[in-house]
Image (tube, rainbow, N blue to C red):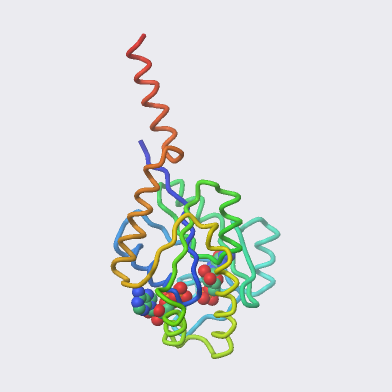
Amino acid sequence: MKRKGILIVVSGFSGAGKGTLMKRLVQDFDNYALSISMTTRNPRPGETDGKEYFFVSREAFEKQIEENGLVEYASYCDNYYGTPREYVEQQLELGKDVILEIEIQGALKVKKKFPSALLMFVMPPSAQELKRRLVGRGTETEEVIEKRLKRASEEAEGIEEYDYIVVNDDLEECVKYMHSLVMAAHATPDRNEELIQNMRKELEAFSK
Ligand code: ADP
Ligand code: 5GP
């Protein structure tokens, strides 16, 4: 029987290490597919269109919204970010666990639309370490870092909505831990309805 893919939402404060963790999950295990979002923000040095994001204009983004081409979208620090629908649906159908690395507004929309989605929130070991990582990454101006830290404080209000919290202290440990949570999610009854129904049918046949 083909295993169904799980839609996995990963959120966390900017600089917590989401991107780093996602890359490792995809590298280390073969069950994951990473959704590439569309955004109106400018590429950072080293980012390529179609790899980290699809970088588009506001007009192109709004056209996608109108055409229902996005699973969800949100505005974050003055830019649009959204999840293209086609890839997600196709990969889930193929049995892949599809990871969406998205912020909280989008995450809550996904949970509403897809109640069986698995929501994980990545926490840094401390707020000080978060700032250190964000500054250390060296990709944003001081002004943008301020904005992102302010936004982190707002996002902290919604953490209870998530299914799991993972603390990204030791990277290796965190990658293994996240993977084990996904594997455990595959074992819940609501994600195995077909297996349960088939077993019931076969057992019924014994008593005929
Ligand atoms: P996010 O995608 O959440 O904004 P990144 O993956 O870009 O965060 O990570 C932010 C910075 O922190 C990067 O420079 C990254 O190398 C570093 N980092 C990520 N995970 C860890 C960790 N476990 N320990 C130390 N530094 C980390
Ligand atoms: P960054 O600019 O650092 O790449 O991303 C900023 C924020 O946007 C992060 O919290 C990231 O998770 C979120 N984000 C990235 N892609 C999407 C998306 O498709 N939808 C939503 N809602 N948020 C996204």
At horizontal 29% and vertical 62% (from top left) the residue drawn is: 28
At horizontal 35% and vertical 63% (from top left) the residue drawn is: 25
Q: Is residue 104 left or right of residue 34?
A: right
Q: Is residue 201 above or below residue 133?
A: above
Is residue 54 in view? no
Give the camera-side residue of 28 and 51: 28
Q: Is residue 60 left or right of residue 33?
A: right
Q: Residue at the far bottom: name it.
A: 142
Q: Residue at the far top: name it.
A: 208
> In which of the image's four quarters is ligand 1 placed?
bottom left
Count how many numbered circles sit on residues in the image: 0
> Residue 75: where, in percent of width, then height?
64, 70
> Residue 188: where, in percent of width, then height?
41, 41
Give the camera-side residue of 30 and 109: 109
Q: Is residue 179 above or below residue 55?
A: above
At horizontal 39% and vertical 67% (from top left) the residue drawn is: 167
Is residue 159 in view? yes
Where is residue 147, by image quadrant? bottom right
Q: Is residue 144 above or below residue 204?
A: below
> Residue 151: where, in percent of width, then height?
59, 76
Give the camera-side residue of 104 and 114: 104
Which image quarter is the C terminus in?
top left
Which image quarter is the N terminus in?
top left
